[in-house]
Amino acid sequence: ANVPTKVDFGLGQVYLLRHVMEGGDWLDESIKKFAQVIQEYERGNEQIEDIAAHAYARMGLIEDVFNHEPQKAIANYKEAAELTSPFYRGEYNGRLGDLYSATCELDLAADAYKAALQAAEVNGDGEKYTEYGEKLSALSAIDLCGSE
């Protein structure tokens, strides 16, 4: 079921990797494929919710790393975290915490890290639990926000 959507997602992954390896127009092709997956989900195909979550996350990665658009990245990671399984929810909330921290939205960063901590605890992932806990604790030491 949903084979064309799964193929679109897989091609999006391949094109993203090709962009990393070769450059060129592969990033645009990757974006098109992930956007197709998201559009299919938004048209009401709830069967692909998990694939759509990962497509949103890849779009978040692209907006952050390649386009340097942290607010767009945040919007995509928020969608991804809401739709995905508890395992990836921790990962995507952790990434949200990093983005919020980088954009000096420290209260939102703390909320995201707390959600990531909760997911790591549910998953029994002690390593991630420690990582997110350390990031949450480090927020209080950030003093560069708002200063010129």
Image: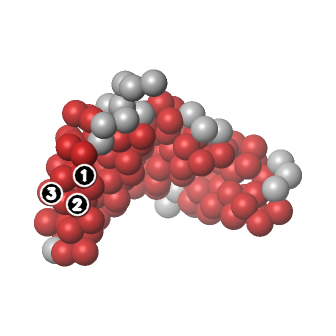
Q: Is residue 1 visible?
A: yes
Q: Are marks 2 and 1 in contact (CB under 8 Å)?
A: yes
Residue for badge 1: 138
* Residues at marks 1 and 3, CA–CA distance in whole angstroms: 18 Å
Q: Is residue 84 visible?
A: no
Q: How many marks?
A: 3
Q: Nearer the viewer, residue 122 or 66?
A: 66
The image position of residue 68, as x and y in percent, is 60, 38
Label ID, residue 134? 2
Amino acid type assigned to the residue bearing label 1 in the image: Ala
130 lies left or right of 7: left
User: Rounded to the nearest whole Å, what is the CA distance between mark 2 and mark 1?
Assistant: 6 Å
Residue matched to label 3? 118
- The residue located at (19%, 53%) in the rendering is 137
At x 20%, y 66%, the residue is 129
Locate residue 92, reporting x and y percent.
36, 52
Local crowd at mark 2 within 10 Å, few (<14), some, or many (≥20)?
Answer: few
